[in-house]
Image: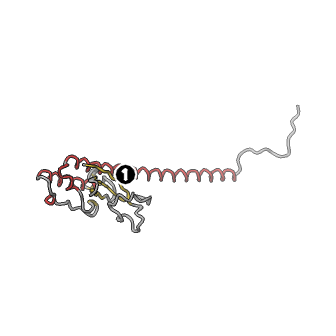
């Protein structure tokens, strides 16, 4: 059998242009992967902050349930947290016994510390909790249902919290969108 050689030699490897196109496609894929990783880390941080805020709110609900006789004392005229660190005076706690009023003062002071991040420390600095946390306790005059809310500064603009959560309203955005405010709220009937 006789071999016939063609006049055109066969290709023996990739050309420089094919290599460059392959590298370009690989780079776009890696950039997309980096973007997904950044979004994932941001979502994980938001989830962690929401969990911490929910724990802080649950802590106050538990404190109120233990001290039911002074439940009305816990209702705050304004928020507690970031720039409002004055613990309400227990002497204005109408209808509560001395021990219930003392328990209220302790509870509010400890809750304020949690809002300020005292749950975790690095040296002498508070690093736990959520950024710029504020807490509010309200009571519906018609239903008697208490709402314990914790709000904080989100890392990116999303949608505003529901209208029923007014704690910290307008304190986290320079505009009226309220998209940087994050919130959790628990309701309890006593």
Viewer-nearest residue: 104 or 6: 104
Position of residue 110 in the picture relative to residue 1 (left or right): left
Which residue is outermost to the front?
Answer: 142
Q: Relative to 107, is 150 on the left or the right?
A: right
Percent of width and height locating residue 135: 29, 57
| Residue for badge 1 | 50
- Residue name at image x 37 percent, y 51 percent: 50
Residue placed farthest to the left in the image? Answer: 98
- The location of residue 32, given as percent across then percent down, is 55, 52
The part of the image, by quadrant, that contains residue 1 is: top right
Query: Is residue 176 or residue 152 the one in the foreground?
Result: 176
Evaluate whether residue 46 shows in this view: yes
Q: Counting other residues with Cα less than 10 Å from the Cα at mark 1, is it few (<14), some (14-19), or many (20 or more)?
A: many
Q: Position of residue 76 (x, y in %)?
A: 24, 59
Q: How is the image coloured?
A: secondary structure
- Toward the top, the furthest residue is 1
The residue tagged with tag 1: helix, strand or loop?
helix
Seen in the picture, residue 1 relative to 186 is either above or below; the reply is: above
- At horizontal 36% and vertical 65% (from top left) the residue drawn is 170
* Left or right of 82 on screen, residue 174: right
Residue 116 is at least partly visible in this image = no
């Amino acid at each position: 059998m006789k071999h016939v050689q063609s006049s055109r030699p066969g290709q023996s490897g990739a050309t420089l242009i094919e290599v460059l196109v392959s590298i370009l496609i690989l780079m776009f894929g890696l950039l997309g992967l980096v973007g997904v990783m950044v979004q994932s880390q941001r979502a994980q941080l938001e989830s962690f902050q929401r969990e911490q805020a929910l724990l802080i709110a649950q802590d106050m609900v538990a404190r109120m349930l233990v001290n039911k006789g002074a439940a009305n004392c816990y209702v705050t005229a304004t928020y507690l947290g970031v720039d409002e660190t004055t613990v309400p005076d227990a002497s204005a706690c109408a209808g509560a016994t001395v021990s219930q009023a003392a328990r209220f003062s302790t509870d509010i002071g400890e809750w304020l510390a949690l809002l300020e991040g005292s749950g975790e420390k690095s040296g002498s600095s508070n690093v736990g909790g959520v950024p710029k946390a504020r807490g509010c306790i309200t009571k519906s005059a018609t239903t008697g249902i208490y709402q314990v809310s914790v709000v904080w500064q989100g890392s990116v603009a999303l949608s505003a919290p529901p209208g029923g959560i007014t704690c910290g309203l307008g304190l986290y955005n320079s505009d009226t969108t309220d998209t940087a405010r994050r919130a959790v709220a628990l309701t309890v009937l006593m």
